[in-house]
Amino acid sequence: MYAIVESGGKQYRVGEGETLEVEKLSADEGEEVVFDKILAVDDGNGLQVGQPYVEGCQVKGKVLKQGRSRKLTVFKYKPKKRYRRKMGHRQPYTQVRIEKIACDG
């Protein structure tokens, strides 16, 4: 059984027991989160596709960790103009373990 959920403007294919990293959510470690924007669900006897979302379905997960990814270097440069800018960026994320995929009917 798997589902395709939308979170933070991105889509993820998730199954029960899997761990994934999504865009930062406002939940503390150990809290339960509910994804209610379900685009599709496959429960073993057919694929249900929503228009745009599947009604009556939700995916429950548990927040394992809040973190930041490794540093990316951003470098701007214009030739012959003595223009150089060097910056770094670390994207925040939330690590979630999927506990249950539940659908009504």
Image (tube, grey):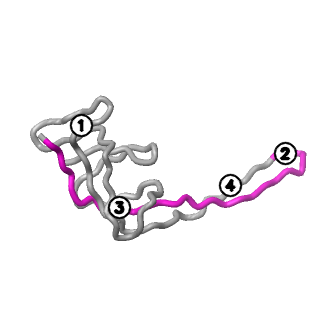
Assign a secondary structure to mark 1.
loop
Q: What's drawn in magenta, residue-wise?
A: 78-104
Check the picture and name the quadrant holding the C terminus: top left
Residue tagged 2: 79
Assign a secondary structure to mark 4.
strand
The location of residue 84, given as percent across then percent down, is 82, 53
Q: Is residue 85 magenta?
A: yes
Residue tagged 1: 55
Query: Residue drawn at (27%, 32%), measured in percent from left and top?
Result: 50
Identify the mark nearer the N-term, 2 or 3.
2
Query: Residue drawn at (25%, 36%), measured in percent from left and top?
Result: 54
Choose between 12 and 62: the one closer to the eye.
62
For badge 2, the amino acid type reads Pro
Distance from disc 2 to disc 3, alpha carbons, whole Å, reads: 44 Å
Crowding near pointer 2: few (<14 within 10 Å), some, many (20+)?
few
Choose between 48 and 29: the one closer to the eye.
29
Residue 27 figure quarter: bottom left
For badge 3, the amino acid type reads Val
Residue 61 vs 79, above or below: the answer is below
Residue tagged 3: 96
Identify the mark nearer the N-term, 1 or 3.
1
Distance from disc 1 to disc 3, alpha carbons, whole Å, reads: 23 Å
